[in-house]
Each structure stands twice: as structure tokens, then as C-alpha cells.
Amino acid sequence: MSTNTHKVEVEAYGIAGLAVASIAFYAFPMTPLYGAAWALPVLALVAEFIRMPVSSNGLRFSFPLPFLAGLAVAGGPFLALLVDVVITIVAGLVPKAAQWRWIVVNSSAAAISCGGASVAYAATSSQVNGSVLPALAFCVVYGIVNYLLVMRIESRFAKTVVRRSANRALGGSGAFAERAPALMVYGLVTVAVAVLAERGFYAIIPVTLLPVLALRASIALKAQMYEQYCETITGLSLMLQRAHPYTHGHIERVARISEEVALRLGLSERQARLVREASVLHDIGKIAVDESILDKPSKLNRFEMDHVRKHAQFGAMILAPVEPFREIVSWIKHHHERPDGLGYPSGLQDVEIPLESKIIAVVDAFDAMAGGQEPSERRTYREPMTQAEALQELEKYAGTQFDANVVKAFVGVVTAQ
Amino acid sequence: MMDLEASVVVALVGVATLTLMFNVTVRQPMRIRRRLDQSLEAFSRAIELRFPGREGMTHRVVRLSQAVARRLKLDRRSTNQLGRAAILSEIGLCAVPYRQLNERAPDDWSEPERDLFRRHPEIGAAMIELIPSLRSVAPIVRCASAAYNGSTGPTFPSHNALPLESRILKVVTDFVDLERQKGTQRAIDHLQQNVQALYDPAVVEAFLDTVHSRSRKNLAMNRLAS
């Protein structure tokens, strides 16, 4: 995206944020804070600074939402919006490499999220007594608006620092069930702060920083577990590449295309991500295969063929001890099965073969035929085919060696590129 | 005084906080350690599948190394690191040709092949450097086959600059390798003959004490059983 387009978008965010703030100023009267109620903006600022990085492109989570909800109760929704914008600007000014355009984008996102949440808060307050439901409405709407805004900003301004509320981390793509407990706790703390603020128990509110800190630590540990999982994949891949250097480019290509084929076949994002990871590891069993047989330029004899074919089972044996891989172990074990039952190692029939294995089989075969244009990646036993020739081979054996639907989806992906 | 609604909400937050804190201090760290052990098991299994003759060796090296570490009064963290290093020091073996280790005896290897085998911990260390959570173990792995007198492996200004964990791994790994090829007594003889040149004397002494006390323990248990 060009710099001018970026500039226009940033200005648009800035204008939108100002507009929302202005409307909120007139729509929601502000009540001044007194005494211990000032704990709320201070806690919101502290929560903003305990943000944590969650991705290499600069995305960070912060946790001010409970205290913003408390401010909406104590001083009105506009006060919550004002504090949210101010703490975002302050947090944006702290890094040495602070960039004004990101401060504008982030604070506008804060204003828009808080503006939407304020509307929900006001609408719910007018309908019900008490602060539980209005606080929940504030929390949910803030989360949804913030999530949508951050998704958009992420897609438009990749590889830049974007503040996003913990709601994104707690929701995010992937299995909702995994994140539901954290979402519930966050919502509960938000409601608790709102209830305490409504009743004037401001002295107790700082204690709610404890569950927020614990939640942050829990998210950090989950991120660490995920990093560890990725590092295991890296470690095993490195071992394979040391044993068989030609596989590096092959793995990268198969992984990328497998994920796209999975999405085209209607698998969820989470499932497609797992297919990608399985594709990175699909040949891991070749660590245990004699490289002189793999690299043999002439036809393999029966014994050599049997030896090479063991790589599918070896792959499953290597990955079996690792809990996070248990879902993909069978996909890797069966990635050389065939719908006509003539595959290996188990000779499974069509319906018995996991769809994910079928995807890897097609992509793996295509890349074996047409991939490896660099000399170091060439297979020793044949020259690579052209893409068109390789696609023809796939279509010729669709229904027998390869699943016909998977071939169709694969052809769609390749021709769209 | 809090009303019922506020009390319930605060109580729920209290329960949630306690649960979270239990997760953060006990459950999740335990899961992380368990997953790390599982990952190391996967690495170890990959090497054992590549070189079936080495099956069981890695686990023996881990157990013996940690026993020696305890005898030398290393703290728990260092002992755990040593266990991880023992497994990771093997991953460089994936660079050793399949047939060299599976089909030919070490006595028949050429000098370049011997050199590649000796350097496999350094190869493994270079791979580990690329994995952030394991990087701290890389220095131990890199020197796992270094001679005490500096004649092979990375050079150090003095004997004691070589990490103690590496000195332990050198003794234990060589012993286990030789024991498999030539028997226990010859492996012990080799260690004793090469103290100071290849092996740290204090580590060899601790190792021999460990092995002998295990032998005595096994003997006593056999007598009890019979």
C-alpha cells in the first residue's frame, strides 16, 4: 500500500475518532470524579502499561477494559472514552520510536470502541436497574468493535505497532472454546469493577488488578506454550534438513499450498493451520531413512522401496510422544494412502483416509513432480515437470491415487496464483 | 456493607483469581515442562529411529549424567539442564550419514568420518541456537565432546572454563558408547587411562563412584531377592 493511501486512512481514522468523541461529549453528560474514584483512571493507565506482545508484527494486548467500565459507571461513558483515548496516547508516546500516525490510529480505535460501548451501556442502563448488565453490554460491544477495528487495521497496515484490547487476544481466530474461560474471567472482572464503582467501594477496586495480572500471566504462558510447540516443529525440521537438504524448499511450498487447499475445501482456519503444520512435518520420518537410497538416481529395488515407505510410520512414531501433535499424527501416518486402497502403510480405503492426509498427498505429489526448480532442490532421479504437466498427472489419477475433490480444490488454488 | 449482588460478584472474582493463580503458578508451568520433555523425547526418538543401534543410549546418558551431577552437588536447575543437553547433544547425529553409523564399525571409519562424528555436538549446538527456548543449553552441547586438555573441540582458556555439564557429558557419553562396543570394564579402563587428557579427574571420580555404588546397590538387591 502506498504512503499516500496510508496517510489518507490514518486521517480517516483520526476524523472518525474525533467525530465519535464529539458525539459522545454531547450525548453523555460527564460526572466529575471525587476522592478514591480517581483510582479508576490510574488503574486504567497501569493496565494499559502491562500490555504484552503477542505477535512479531508489533501487536500488543492491554487490559484497561474493566476500569473503563468502572469509569462509565462512576463518571459517565464520555469520561471512559476520554480516559481510554488519553491512556492510549500516553502509552503511545512512551516508546523512543513513537510514531504519531500510530498514536492517531490507536487512539481513534479506542475512541470508536469506547463510543460504541457507551451507546450499549446507555441503552442497557435505561432498560434495567443495576450495573451488571450495562457493564456486560459495555464489555461485549467494546470487544466486538475493537476486534473488528484491529482486524481491519492489521490487514491494512501490516507489520506495524497496533494496540489492541485483550478482547482480541481472548477471542481471536481459532477455537472459541479454548478462549471462553479467559473471556469469562475478563468479563467477570469488568462486571465486578462496575458493581463496586456503582456502590462507591473504590478502595476495593485496586484489588481487581490481581485477577487482571493473573490473566495476563496466563495468556503469556499460553503464548509460551504455543511458541514451544512452534519451536519443536522448527527443531524437527532442522534435523530433517540436516539429514536431507533437498527437502527445505519442498516443505515450505507444500505447507503454504496445503493450508490454502484446506481453506478452499471449507475447513476452518484452525484446521487449515493444523494442516499447514502437518505439512511441515509430513516427511519428518525421512530423518530415519537412508539418504543414499532417497538420493539414488536409478529405480529403487523392492527392499529400498519398503525402506523409504517406512517414513510415514516413522513420522508418526517421532511425533506420537508430543501432546499437541496427537491430532496430526494420523494425518502424517496416512499421507501416502490412496482412495483405491493401494496406498501405504495401512492400505486404507477412501472413506477411512483423513481428508487432511488426502490434501497433503495431493500437494506433496504435485511438488515432487513440479517443484524444485533450483538445482539444489532437484530430485536426483528425474527432471521436474512443468506445472501444466504435473496438474495433468493429478487429474489423470483423481479418484484412484488422489481424492477427486481435493484435486479440484488444488487446481483451483494453483491456477488462481 | 456490601449487598448480595456485589458480594456474589466479588466472591466469583475471588474464586476466578484463585483458580487463575493456581493455573499460573502450578498447572501451566507443569504443562510447559511436560511439553518440553515430550519435545525432547521426539528429538531423541528421531535419532534412535535413524540409528537403531543407539536405542536406549540417550536415556542411559541422561540418567547417568544426572546421577553424576547430583554427586557433584550441582543444583536442580543445572541438573535438569544437563538432562536436556544430554538429549540435545545427539540431534547433530542427523548430519552423520545413515550408513556410517548403521553399517560400519567405528574402527573402519575414515578420518573425515571420525571427525564428523566427533563434531556432531557442535552441529547440534548450531541447530539449537536457532531455537530460542533451548538456546541456553547450546554452550553445554557445543562442548559435549571437547577434550579436557583442549586437544579436540572448541578451545578454552583453561580446563575449568569448559562448562562442568559438558565435562560430565563427555565422560558419560564416551563411557556409554564404549560400553556398548567393548563392555563395561574396558570402558572404565579407557576413562581411567585418559584422565587429565580427555576427562576431568573430578568428574571421572564422581562417575566411577556413581557406577560402583549402583553396582553395589544392584548386588544387594539381587541378594535380597534371592
Image: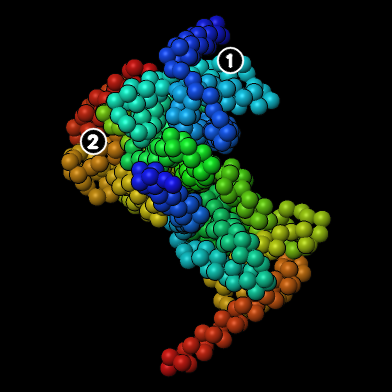
Q: Pinpoint the chain carrying mark 2.
A: A
Say if labels 1 and 2 share a chain.
yes
Relative side of B185 to B225, left or right: right
Q: Nearer the viewer, residue A31 or A194?
A: A31
Amino acid under disc 1: Arg
Whether residue A40 is visible, yes or no, is yes
**Position in image of residue A85 (x %, y %):** 54, 21
Residue at 37% over, 22% down:
A122
Q: How much space separates mark 1 and mark 2, taking CA atoms? A: 54 Å
For residue A101, the mark is: 1
Relative side of A18 to A413, left or right: right
Amino acid under disc 2: Gln
Q: Residue placed farthest to the right in the image?
A: B157
Relative side of A222 to A367, left or right: right
**Position in image of residue A307 (x %, y %):** 36, 51
Quadrant containing the C terminus of chain B is bottom left
Residue at 52% over, 50% down:
B94
Q: How are the residues colored?
A: rainbow
Q: Total of numbered circles in the picture? A: 2
Residue at 65% over, 65% down:
B75
Q: Pinpoint the chain carrying mark 1.
A: A
Residue at 37% over, 33% down:
A131
Against A107, is B105 above or below?
below
Q: Circle 2 sits on which residue?
A: A401
Q: Secondary structure at mark 1?
A: helix
**Position in image of residue A92 (x %, y %):** 61, 24
Against A390, is B5 above or below?
below
